[in-house]
């Protein structure tokens, strides 16, 4: 629906009373063709592409809380495709291409901003690693540039470029098409799109158990009753091992907390994303002016979605050594999300060994960028009962066969998100 400027103004003054909901609030049916557990970006994108690409519309997305209340609404929204291992390369580049057309496809502004990303290096060894990565990416048709400190200082002033800095900046690997997006809008846009195809999006609906019939998964037990389905897909991010265990599966996944921070709003300082992977620090500036920052995962297993002081100290010690002016910054908020960490840092998108159950998980700290391709590939896998070539290497069997996809921190430098 389109509104005139006057109508939008009137809606604002009347508490949006007549504003149509973006998606319906249906009562769960007794049976669907496909159930997706988890109403984050990945689950909603899967439902959208099941309907749009495969014509499967008798689908329910079951979310225990509210849409995007998990990692989708907690992440720092960095999107990039500079992965260099075969398997990851084509998948993340496909994702970036989907991002580039996403607002048009959904007819919903996800505020995708291709502001570029710099991954800094600080000694000759790191520069060699960055050069190798940039060369590999370019050979695979993915743009990446190596720039020196002089060029970077001209493009991103304000960092400590002095030779006696704690970690002298020698340059960066730069991906121009990388950027950020508005996380909530991604969930809402996919939800609206899926709903318009007839998908039921059901919030406050927690899956407690699986229903099995002669070994096959045939539905789920929820706090809103039993719901049957021919196929059940999980896209529950940090809860992957916990939910899979209810089906009797033990996955090679551990859950850790990842924290992030946002500052008071400032005037525009820089219009790009900077990752200082060597010391676990990255930063961008939101459209509201807040500096959005993060670091490494907490070093112990936890499902607690909250922040803590030791990580804050660690992240800002690294940040101040890199951007000394951060010492005068006031932090507004700190939060945590739960990460399903695989042993090789790469995700799982596949049919599970149990008939009727499909797994999407193991996103570690980097799944937001994957949202479009993850949904696209998971929908293909569920609809056709086989992986697409883009997720063919994301099977569970790689852990038993020893074909790990280890990018050493899944980026040009560790923890670059
Ligand atoms: P979620 O949004 O977590 O969705 C899973 C949903 O499943 C949740 O809403 C949850 O409530 C629901 N659920 C769980 N159990 C059940 C159940 N039993 N029944 C029903 N529903 C259930 N990635 C990047 O690419 N770039 C970044 O810059 C980046 N920064 C990050 C920073 C932080 C602080 C965090 C926490 C994460 C970051 N990530 C980043 C990672 C990214 O957010 C995740 O990998 C990605 O969002 C996970 O997929 P999802 O969106 O579907 O998960």
Image: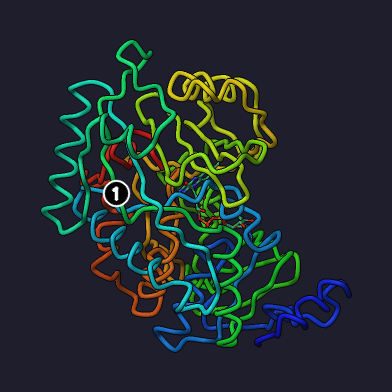
Q: Position of residue 354 (x, y in %)?
A: 42, 64
Observer-nearest of 257 and 412: 412
Task: Indicate left or right for 95 with 109 as reference.
Answer: left
Question: Which residue is outermost to the left?
Answer: 139
Task: Indicate left or right for 353 with 149 as reference.
Answer: right
Q: Position of residue 264 (x, y in %)?
A: 67, 37
Residue pictured at 52% horizontal, 78% vertical: 34
Looking at the image, what colour scheme do you see? rainbow
Residue pictured at 43% horizontal, 23% vertical: 322
Observer-nearest of 100 and 219: 100
Q: Position of residue 49 (x, y in %)?
A: 44, 77
Mark 1 lies on a secondary structure that is strand
Task: Indicate left or right for 337 with 125 as reference.
Answer: right
Q: Position of residue 47 (x, y in %)?
A: 51, 75
**Residue holding disc 1:** 175
Question: Which residue is outermost to the top?
Answer: 164
Q: Is residue 141 above or below residue 26?
A: above
Question: Which residue is outermost to the right?
Answer: 14
Task: Name which quarter of the figure residue 219 lies in.
Answer: bottom right
Count of all numbered marks drawn on residues in the image:
1
Q: Is residue 270 above or below residue 68?
A: above
Label 1 CB-ligand 1 distance < 8 A: no
Residue pictured at 39% horizontal, 62% vertical: 352
Q: Quadrant of the N terminus?
A: bottom right
Observer-nearest of 15 and 39: 15
Residue pictured at 78% horizontal, 80% vertical: 19
Q: Quadrant of the C terminus?
A: top left
Q: Is residue 365 above or below residue 179?
A: above
Task: Indicate left or right for 341 with 287 as reference.
Answer: left
User: What crowding class fits label 1: few (fewer than 14 Cα within 10 Å), some (14-19), or many (20 or more)?
Assistant: many
């Amino acid at each position: 629906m389109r509104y005139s400027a006057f109508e939008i103004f009137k809606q604002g003054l009347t508490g949006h009373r007549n504003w149509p909901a973006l998606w319906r609030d249906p009562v769960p049916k007794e049976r669907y063709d496909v159930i997706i557990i988890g109403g984050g970006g990945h689950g909603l994108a899967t439902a959208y592409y099941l309907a749009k690409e495969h014509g499967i519309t008798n689908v329910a997305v079951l979310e225990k809380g509210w849409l995007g209340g998990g990692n989708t609404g907690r992440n720092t929204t960095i999107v990039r495709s500079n992965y260099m291992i075969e398997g990851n390369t084509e998948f993340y580049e496909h994702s970036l291409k989907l991002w580039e057309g996403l607002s048009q496809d959904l007819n919903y502004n996800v505020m995708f901003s291709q502001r570029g990303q710099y991954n800094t290096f600080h000694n000759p060894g790191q520069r060699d690693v960055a050069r190798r990565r940039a060369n590999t990416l370019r050979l695979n048709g993915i743009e990446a540039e190596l720039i020196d400190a002089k060029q970077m200082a001209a493009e991103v002033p304000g960092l400590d470029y002095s030779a006696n800095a704690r970690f002298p900046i020698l340059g960066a690997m730069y991906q121009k098409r990388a950027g950020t997006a508005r996380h909530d809008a991604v969930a809402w846009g996919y939800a609206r799109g899926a709903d318009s195809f007839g998908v039921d999006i059901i919030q406050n609906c927690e899956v407690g158990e699986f229903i099995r019939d002669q070994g096959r998964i045939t539905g789920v037990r929820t706090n809103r009753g039993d719901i049957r389905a021919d196929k059940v897909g999980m896209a529950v991010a940090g809860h992957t091992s916990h939910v899979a265990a209810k089906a009797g599966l033990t996955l090679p996944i551990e859950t850790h907390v990842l924290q992030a921070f946002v500052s008071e709003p400032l005037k525009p300082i820089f219009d790009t994303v900077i990752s200082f992977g060597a010391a676990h620090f990255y930063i961008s500036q939101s459209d509201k002016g807040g500096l959005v920052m993060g670091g490494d995962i907490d070093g112990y297993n936890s499902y607690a979605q909250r922040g803590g002081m030791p990580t804050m100290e660690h992240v800002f010690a690294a940040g101040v050594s890199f951007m000394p002016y951060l010492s005068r910054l006031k932090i507004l908020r700190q939060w945590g999300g739960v990460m399903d960490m695989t042993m090789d840092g790469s995700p799982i998108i596949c049919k599970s060994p149990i008939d009727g159950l499909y797994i999407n998980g193991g996103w570690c700290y980097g799944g937001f960028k994957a949202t479009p391709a993850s949904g696209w590939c998971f929908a293909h896998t569920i609809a056709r009962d086989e992986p697409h070539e883009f997720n063919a290497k994301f099977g569970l069997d790689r852990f038993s066969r020893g074909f790990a996809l280890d990018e050493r921190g899944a980026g040009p430098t560790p923890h670059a998100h």
